[in-house]
Amino acid sequence: MATSAAGTPFGPIGTITGGVGGAIISAQLNKKLKPIMEELALNLVGLDKEDIFYFKNKTTIDCLAKSYLGNVNILYA
């Protein structure tokens, strides 16, 4: 929005060019800053990427563990 507003004095072409330029710059900044921000957020809450993987797949992991437990009970019954 800021680059679009900066292009406004140059008419509609400046506004459009500024908007497109701002979108491109924003996308590039997002690519570079996203991993850093994610790492910072995880550090602030005391988690790591393995914890996030577990929370995203908790149901599947728990079902797999129950399956293994059921197999052990069958084998040693």
Image (cartoon, rainbow, N blue to C red):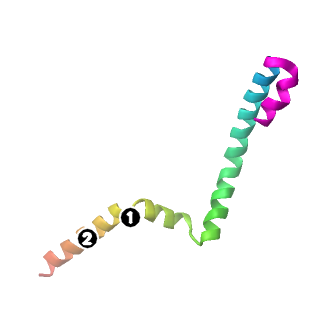
Q: Residue at x 47, y 61 (%)?
A: 53
| Numbered tag placed on residue 20 in the rendering | none
How packed is label 2: few (under 14 Cα within 10 Å), some, or many (20 or more)?
A: few
Residue 75 lies in quadrant: bottom left
Is 64 placed left or right of 14 in the picture? left
Where is 14 relative to 29, above or below?
Answer: above
Where is 66 relative to 22, above or below?
Answer: below
Residue 11 position within the rendered picture, expressed as x and y whole percent measured from the top left: 83, 18
In reply to whether residue 75 is colored magenta, the answer given is no
Where is 35 relative to 20, above or below?
Answer: below
- Which is nearer the eye, 31 or 73? 31
| Numbered tag placed on residue 66 in the rendering | 2
Q: Residue at x 34, y 62 (%)?
A: 59
Marked residue nearer the N-terminal end (2 or 1): 1
- Look at label 1 and name its amino acid: Lys
SS assignment at label 2: helix
SS assignment at label 1: helix
Residue 27 position within the rendered picture, expressed as x and y whole percent measured from the top left: 68, 39
In reply to whether residue 3 is colored magenta, the answer given is yes
Q: Which residues are magenta?
A: 1-12
In the picture, the quarter occupied by the N terminus is: top right
